[in-house]
Amino acid sequence: MTTSGLIAETYRQELMLRRGRAAHAGTLVVVALAVLWPLVLSARWQTAGVFALIAAIAAMGLHITTGLAGQVSLGHAAFVAIGVYSAVWMGVDRGWAWWIWLPASGLVAAIVGLFVGPFALRLRGLYLAVVTVALLSVTQYVWGVWPDLTGGFNGRSAQRWDIRGHSLFSDLDVFGLITLNGNQLFWFVCLAILAVIAIAARNLQRTRPGRGWAAIRDRDLAAAVAGVPITQAKVSAFVVGAFFGGVAGALLAAFQSYVVPEQFGLELSVRYIAIIVIGGLGSVAGVVVGSFFVTILPLIITSLTGLLPFISDRPSTAGGFTVDLVAAFVYGLAIVVVLVFEPRGLMGVWERFRDVWRTWPWSR
């Protein structure tokens, strides 16, 4: 081997070693945050964290439909709502166990996605987005005229989640070492479900259907020429995305204990779009990062109201800067910044920093 080849091989081995160290360090940091978040933070932050995990599960479905397959959907909140009311019907009205209503809620949403998917065969882009908005409008109407299921516009109570006779809203003593409250129990349960769904989504990207979705996203005509089954691929993207959304809806119903149809409108769908764009389109980790960014942001702004007196933490009918208004402005601005300067989102920023860290002498 020549001297230049030996130097190149040495550099490659050193870079691989640094990558391994960085990966292990990153994994340890993520695990530590996941375990410590509900144990050291207050009840407000615990609740916000659970909502962020549920939003990540729902946005993982949009990650499949839009981030991987390129099928623009502004009606993802409809699948979440279907999961919510499926869980309410099965858990409250029928009294079924959680291990039935949780996956079954995802299956009901997936069946609806199966009927919506064929529209993606003839439509794309803005036209497909309009169809998904129409789906959202139809479901909003159904929830309003079906009070026996939804409670009408006043909403209704959802089921409490019991596992082996123990409610997740009750304190649980763990081997006499620590007592977990309801928020902490829900955190770890939702974290486990998110981990399963994230691993499934990551593995789907590497399978033949996942590569087909990516090909359709880049250019569906070229994908068809290359032998990708366009019909099955587009429909399956909607089905899988709807399933994840339905599971998230069931978890949301169980955690909130009271649901109102108005909360599953266009604003919620736009929030899921913001999550996958800010976190990084096509990135599973970006979905989780984006979910926490969008969900935790109002709480961070609320904590700054003392330092920024022009922001009010109370709803105002006379105008002014409320927490929700400032939060909407900030993550709207974040979307613009991401689209202009870093299309890969927050994960793209992290990857740039990681590459710099690997190549500079201080990382030795």
Image (spheres, rainbow, N blue to C red):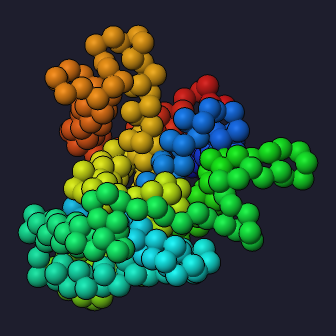
Of residues 135 and 59, the one drawn nearer to the viewer in this rendering: 135
Question: Relative to 296, does residue 227 appear above or below in the rendering?
Answer: below
Q: Is residue 39 left or right of residue 318?
A: right
> Residue at 11% of width from left, 66% of height from top?
130
Q: Is residue 307 above or below residue 175?
A: above
Q: How many marks?
A: 0
Residue drawn at point x = 45 percent, y = 77 percent = 89
Q: Residue 179's spot in the image, x, y percent?
A: 80, 45
Question: Residue at 74% of width from left, 69% of height from top?
Answer: 165
| Residue shown at 34% from the left, 66% from the top | 151
Q: Quadrant of residue 283?
A: bottom left
Residue 342 visible, this orientation: yes
Image coords of residue 270 (percent x, y): 25, 52
Q: Residue furthest right?
A: 176
Question: On the picture, is 124 further left or further right than 329?
Answer: left
| Frontmost residue, 130 versus 236 | 130
Which residue in the rendered view is the most extreme toward the left? Answer: 127
**Observer-nearest of 236 and 316:** 316
Q: Quadrant of the N terminus?
A: bottom right
Give the image location of residue 220, x and y in percent.
19, 76
Is any atom of residue 202 visible in this view?
Answer: no
Examine the image and state in which quarter residue 109 appears: bottom left
Q: Nearer the viewer, residue 153 or 136?
A: 153
Is residue 133 placed above or below 208 in the rendered structure?
above
